[in-house]
Amino acid sequence: MGRRGSRIGTGDREGRHRQLIAALLVFVAACASNPQKDGPPIGVDLALVDSPGSIVYFPGPVNLRFEVTLTNPTDEPVTLRRLDLRTIGGSSLFLRATGTPFNVEVKPRASTSVTTSVWANSRGGMLAQDEPISLQATAYFNGPKGPFVRLVAANLSTR
C-alpha cells in the first residue's frame, strides 16, 4: 500500500496516451477518406413533378416525384453518384433519408435534369395540404479532382 498513485482514477498514463494517439489516428484516417466539401460550384435544384395539390390530404404513404436539375458552370464534367432526400422540420409529410444511386454525367457548362421517385408518409388533414415541404438534399458527385458533396435545402409546395 505504500505505492504512490494507488488511488482510484490514477491509471497508467502511457496507456491513456496510447489510446488517445490511436483515437486521433482513426479520426484523421476517417477525415481523409470522406468526400471533399469544397468542390466545383455545381447547382442542385429540386421541384415536385406530377403532384396534385391534394396528395398530402389523406394520411399514409404517398409517392412523390422530384425533378433534380444539375447545373455545371465549370469546364470539366462531373457525375452525380447518389442523392439523399429527407424532410427537415415539421412539415406535412415525413421522408426517410434513403439514398438513391445515380450515374448521371453533367457536361461542362451545361444543365441536366433527372427525375426520381420516393415514398413518404403524409400526416394528412386540411391544413397539411397547404404546408410547404421542407427538404434537405445531399448530392454526392465525382469530379476530376475526386468526390465532393453538395447540400441543398428547399421549400416546395404541392400546389
Image (cartoon, grey):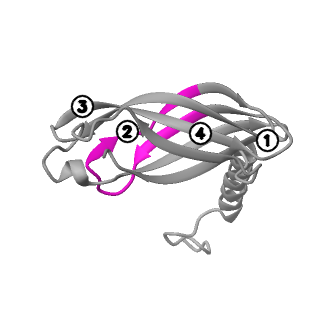
Measure the alpha-carbon separation of dots 3 and 4.
25 Å
Please state which amino acid type lies under the numbered disc 3: Pro
Most foreground residue, 81 or 6: 81
Report helix, strand or loop for mark 4.
strand
Where residue 134 sits: x, y (%)?
Answer: 39, 53
Residue 34 in view in this figure = no
Residue in view at x 35 percent, y 49 percent: 157
* Residue 36 visible here: yes
For marks 4 and 1, the one nearer the N-term is 4
Name the residue tied to disc 3.
Answer: 61
Of labels 3 and 2, earlier in sequence is 3
Q: Is residue 57 left or right of residue 159?
A: left
Amino acid marked by disc 4: Thr
Looking at the image, which residue is at 30% across and 43% down? 94
Query: Residue 108: horizontal and vertical position, in percent?
Result: 81, 37
Q: What numbered label is drawn on residue 109?
A: 1
Question: Mark 2 highlights which residue?
Answer: 96
Magenta range is 82-101
Crowding at dot 3, Cα within 10 Å, few <14 / some 14-19 / many 20+, comes out as: some
**Between disc 3 and disc 4, whose residue precedes?**
3
Say if the magenta span includes residue 111.
no
Closer mark to the observer between disc 4 and disc 2: 4
4 or 2: tag closer to the N-terminus: 4
Q: Mark 4 points at which residue?
A: 69
x, y percentage for residue 35?
71, 44
| Alpha carbons under labels 4 and 2: distance apart | 21 Å
Task: Say which element carries label 3.
Answer: strand
